[in-house]
Image: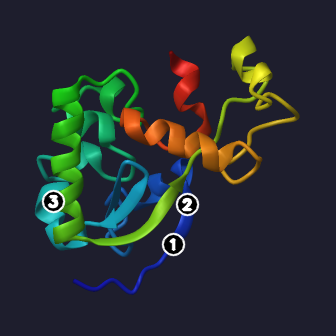
Amino acid sequence: MESSLQLGEIAEEELKAYDGSDPNKPLLMAIKGQVFDVSSSRKFYGPDGPYASLSGKDASRALATMSFKEKDLNGDISGLSPPELDNLHDWENTFKSKYVRVGTVKKIAPSANDSSMEATEMGLASSGPKSIDDGPIAAEHVEECKPRGRNYWLGCCLKQ
């Protein structure tokens, strides 16, 4: 398992460029914010494959729920049931054992324009989006979300 590609942190919008539509680019998809090079399974995740809709995006919700509906083709894992979270964990382990991790998806917390009052109270709704590394509450918030099986970014508790 080798990949010469190392992306580091990549925005969700940038990940779309690796959906298999360009045969000269690697085929990537993400699970729980971890980006994997799935080029070795192009027959499954490539444009003509049965799982093509999962490529070029964080497909966590789709894998957890086994739904390929457009509304589920995203990385939002809030509100998943314990069996769905177990299913997602199994998929994550499969990908870790089969594919090379080449980066992470940069998560952006809601800005003041699209968040609730709760975001303002948490100190997130300021002059624009913040990444998980942009504040003093980031590390403790990640630790708070881990036991709940939540997505590890600042917006995870805003959806309750």
Single out the mark in the foreground, 2 or 3: 3
Displayed quadrant of residue 35: bottom left
**Residue 20 in the image: x percent, y percent?**
31, 60
Q: CA distance from mark 1 to mark 2?
A: 7 Å
Tell me if label 1 and label 2 are in contact, CB under 8 Å.
Answer: yes
Q: CA distance from mark 3 to mark 1?
A: 21 Å
Is 4 positioned to the left or the right of 131 in the image? left
Mark 2, secondary structure of its residue: strand
For the point 25% across and 26% down, the residue is 69
Single out the mark in the foreground, 3 or 1: 3
Q: Label 2, on which residue?
A: 10
**Mark earlier in primary sequence (2, 3):** 2
Q: Label 1, on which residue?
A: 7
Mark 1, secondary structure of its residue: loop
| Residue 42 versus residue 126 in the image, above or below | below
Displayed quadrant of residue 116: top right
Q: Which amino acid type corresponds to the residue marked 3 in the rendered image? A: Thr
Q: Label 3, on which residue?
A: 94
Q: Which amino acid type corresponds to the residue marked 2 in the rendered image? A: Ile
Displayed quadrant of residue 100: bottom left
For the point 15% across and 67% down, the residue is 41
**Residue 90 in the image: x percent, y percent?**
15, 49
Is 111 positioned to the left or the right of 138 in the image? right
